[in-house]
Image (cartoon, rainbow, N blue to C red):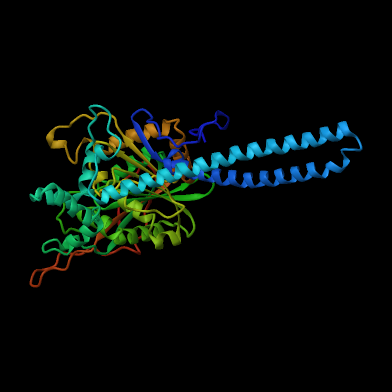
Amino acid sequence: MADATPADSGGTPRVTAQPDDGSLRIRGGVGGISFQFEELLAGAGALEGLVRRLQSVQVEADAVRRALFPYQADSYASGSNAIIAVGEAGRDVGRVRSQLQRMGEDVRASHREYEYAEARNSLLLRLGLHGPGYGAAPEPFALPGVRDTVEGWIAMMPGNLAALLGLPAPLAAVVGALQGPTDVRRLVRDASGAPGLAFLNPRPVNIAGRETFTATVDLSPAGLLRRAGAMGEPGGRIEVIEVDGADRRSWVVIIPGTQLGGPPDGTNPFDPAGIAEALGYDSASTAAAIRQSLEQAGARPGEQLVAVGYSQGGIHAMNLSKDAALLAEYDLKFVLTAGSPVGGISPGPDVASLHLEHEQDWVPGADGLVNPDTRGRVTVTLTNPLTVPPPADFGLGPGHRLENYADGATLISASQDTTLRDSTAALAAVVGTGGAATVTRFSLRREARPSPRGVPALPRTRPGPGASSGRLREGSSPRETPG
């Protein structure tokens, strides 16, 4: 491992934090702390096995030395030299065995220290004690980004709210400790049961129409994120792309971000109520519509799949990575998200993921959880300076702009960092390098809420499981085929 101290230096192998790559701050993957520890522990196990073998060799060498004693009188000089040589070889083996054993013990001790530090941090978090005073202090004059500030505030919401209500700081800390880290999923579900917020409850999502055409598709991370941005223009649409992957046909699902402008209880599944479905209900209704869309697009069981999402769409995409029905049908290999709060979602064991965040984007911190540092999960935090837009164009802030994330994805593709190269190679292994592909755009509609008694119901969009497909040539004007 590149970050380990060389074996002949006499030092103990240690894990190191991943260095920044320009404006990219990297966590997880093959350079992440967790994977480094996995490598070290695997190395410690291998060393222990070698120590046991060397111990057997040392015992055998001593047995050979003793077996030579009766022959020493036959030729005193050569017999003595043989006995001495075998004895020295046994002692050399013993010295190597002792060094390897000490190195393995040091690695185990380093891992115990890491586990202790993680347990300590988890306990402090539950007690509501966090900040520079309980860990490494920030660099001089460094201020936490908007993302970290929001994440920390939400994680400690019970204690923070107690403090805002005027409780003394020690009592507020006790409240925070008793409540523990904020369970955003539970909060969303509780809110959907409150008076006037029933529209947050999930409703079935159906296919209202689809269009199919051939287009040249950029399958790089930046190209895929830009397609997610384009999906945000017409409301309620997703894309299912059939591509010739590196070794066989595969599929890409593109899911847009939150779409505003409609009523709070409307039929667009990606309106603000869609955030509640994604965070509180594991995207159950949207995931079912995506599975149906894949089937209608022609995806066969067992074929490989990539899910891409921006903002709200990233939550839906990550929820697919733990959706039992989808994982039983398709081989989901990779998830790409940008500006999405997905720290509380644990993907299936064989699903790799790449998450883009910006330190000045509060949205990825809205769940109060840091993305786990694992072998298959890479989080890249963008730190590039941003230009504050005019108030009319401010939206959710300059850090949340999709074009900013697409530019960051371009830097990721050009990076020589081992972790990023490994992650982008995993994506390319599924989708290939791009080119002509078959694109099917599906219009999804959430079922309308039942009207109050005495109020006429709005027309409901008929689901389209049997909607026909119009196949268009690239450059032609697609027309939606109603369901």
Foreground of the two, 117 or 83: 83
Residue 455 place in picture, x, y as percent: 8, 69
Q: Is residue 87 above or below residue 207?
A: above
Foreground of the two, 390 or 132: 132
Q: Is residue 140 above or below residue 293?
A: above
Left or right: 86, with 323 as reference point: right
Q: Farthest front residue?
A: 73
Q: Quadrant of the C terminus?
A: bottom left
Residue 87 place in picture, x, y as percent: 75, 37
Residue placed at 15% from the left, 51% from the top?
Answer: 172
Q: Is residue 9 above or below residue 151?
A: above
Examine the rendering and report whether any part of residue 252 can be seen: yes
Residue 74 place in picture, x, y as percent: 92, 38
Q: Is residue 198 above or below residue 155?
A: below
Left or right: 277, with 9 as reference point: left
Left or right: 75, with 263 as reference point: right
Residue placed at 52% from the left, 43% from the top?
Answer: 105
Examine the rendering and report whether any part of residue 483 can be seen: no
Foreground of the two, 379 or 165: 165
Foreground of the two, 184 or 229: 184
Residue placed at 44% from the left, 57% from the top?
Answer: 298
Residue 127 place in picture, x, y as percent: 24, 50
